[in-house]
Image (cartoon, helix red, strand yellow):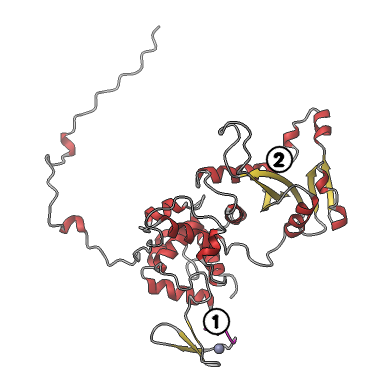
């Protein structure tokens, strides 16, 4: 498909989203279209064309294998209704700061925190498209500690839970800051920094760094290195903390997002997933339509292999472990029209006093402030 069009291929607003995806069947049909815009293609043999069976599955005309729209995607064998998935996806893609597992659980009546937590982590796990473009032009690169308690708040410079993170930011575009990339680093050695930079930045680019020796091999990797020395900045009377202003601004935004939306409760094992979400949203911050971002997330989700719950755990359980573990499958958001329950309810609300706005006491006339000494 050429460029997807607003209002036809993705909704332009929350109102349109609600009008398009009223039932789980609407959502399934949209996923069907996102996955096979040119019609069904067999995932096992690649044959194009088949029949739709009574249960909604497809039978391949070539190999006669049967498959469902959600099979082989991150929605594979999900027990969460697609209306709930789609609403989670809409919030994830269209909210400026995304959504936390706790607020998702509350607003969509998801019975358990781990279910909401796993939904968001499944969405995060699809965001890095294989073979995506690397950053180019002039790119600032630095490493910083992210996550865990803020120094100064926890007594001492506790860095126990903080994770060293590499940050690369394109600079010098019309808006000053272009795209960014982030990745967790084992340490600040060249052995850790070099793979991060070669994975994130196109060779031939100019890489701006501080004087740290871990960056000294960049030239041999095909980059032009612009080295900014703290000592030289101090000698010039400049603030050495402002050597790499763009990368520090992006790092500050990421830290504030983790503290704000997620209350800083991100452990090291899951930090890479949160960084992927931050980078995905940051790089689409000026997208013309939030609905297009929603479409992109679903497109990635429909093209991604299933993600199992135990793979998401990464050796750790989600923060609170409530008694309702595993029993959190929410009701569908598919609802019949409610026919104005406030009019038809058995118990008419008895207001002690009829609301008559005219009976409210008149506000006292305001006196002009008296400025006399
Ligand atoms: Zn087939």
The part of the image, by quadrant, that contains residue 270 is bottom right
- The residue at 50%/64% (across/down) is 309
- The reply, left or right, for residue 352 in relation to residue 93 is left
Where residue 4 appears, as percent x and y from the top left, is 55, 70
- The reply, left or right, for residue 67 in relation to residue 22 is right
Q: Is residue 44 magenta?
A: yes
SS category of the residue bearing label 2? helix
Give the residues drawn in magenta, as a range.
Answer: 37-45
Query: Around disc 2, counting alpha carbons within 10 Å, would you say few (fewer than 14), some (14 to 19), or many (20 or more)?
Result: few
SS category of the residue bearing label 1? loop
- The residue at 16%/59% (across/down) is 344
Query: Which residue carries the number 2 mark?
Result: 245
Q: Is residue 343 magenta?
A: no
- The residue at 74%/59% (across/down) is 199
- The reply, left or right, for residue 172 in relation to residue 204 is left
Ligand 1 located in image quadrant? bottom right
Query: Around disc 1, counting alpha carbons within 10 Å, would you say few (fewer than 14), some (14 to 19), or many (20 or more)?
Result: few
Badge 1 or badge 2: first in the primary sequence: 1
């Amino acid at each position: 498909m050429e460029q997807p069009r607003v209002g036809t291929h993705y909704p332009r607003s929350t109102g349109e989203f609600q009008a398009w995806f009223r039932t789980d069947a609407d959502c399934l049909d949209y996923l069907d279209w996102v996955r096979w815009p040119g019609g069904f293609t067999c995932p096992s043999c690649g044959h194009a064309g088949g029949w739709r069976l009574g249960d909604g599955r497809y039978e391949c005309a070539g190999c006669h294998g049967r498959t469902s729209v959600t099979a082989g995607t991150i929605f594979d064998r999900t027990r969460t209704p697609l209306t709930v998935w789609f609403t989670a996806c809409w919030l994830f893609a269209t909210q400026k700061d995304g959504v936390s597992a706790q607020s998702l659980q509350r607003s969509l009546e998801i019975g358990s925190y781990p279910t909401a937590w796993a939904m968001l982590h499944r969405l995060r796990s699809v965001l890095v498209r294989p073979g995506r473009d690397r950053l180019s032009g002039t790119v600032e690169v630095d490493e910083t500690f992210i996550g865990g308690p803020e120094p100064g708040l926890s007594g001492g410079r506790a860095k126990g839970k903080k994770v060293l993170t590499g940050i690369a930011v394109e600079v010098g575009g019309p808006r000053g800051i272009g795209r960014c990339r982030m990745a967790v680093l084992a340490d600040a050695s060249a052995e850790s920094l070099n793979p991060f930079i070669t994975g994130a930045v196109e060779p031939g680019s100019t890489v701006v760094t501080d004087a740290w020796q871990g960056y000294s091999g960049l030239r041999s990797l095909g980059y032009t290195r612009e080295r900014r020395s703290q000592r030289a900045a101090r000698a010039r009377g400049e603030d050495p903390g402002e050597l790499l202003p763009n990368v520090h601004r992006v790092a500050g935004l990421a830290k504030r997002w983790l503290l704000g939306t997620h209350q800083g409760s991100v452990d090291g094992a899951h930090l890479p997933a949160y960084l992927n979400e931050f980078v995905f949203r940051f790089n689409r911050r000026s997208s013309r339509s939030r609905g297009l971002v929603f479409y992109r997330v679903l497109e990635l989700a429909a093209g991604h292999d299933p993600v199992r719950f135990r793979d998401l755990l990464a050796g750790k359980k989600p923060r609170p472990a409530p008694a309702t573990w595993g029993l959190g499958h929410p009701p569908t958001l598919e609802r019949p029209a409610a026919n104005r329950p406030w009019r038809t309810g058995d118990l008419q609300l008895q207001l002690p006093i009829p609301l008559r706005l005219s009976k409210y006491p008149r506000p006292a006339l305001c006196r002009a402030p008296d400025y006399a000494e």
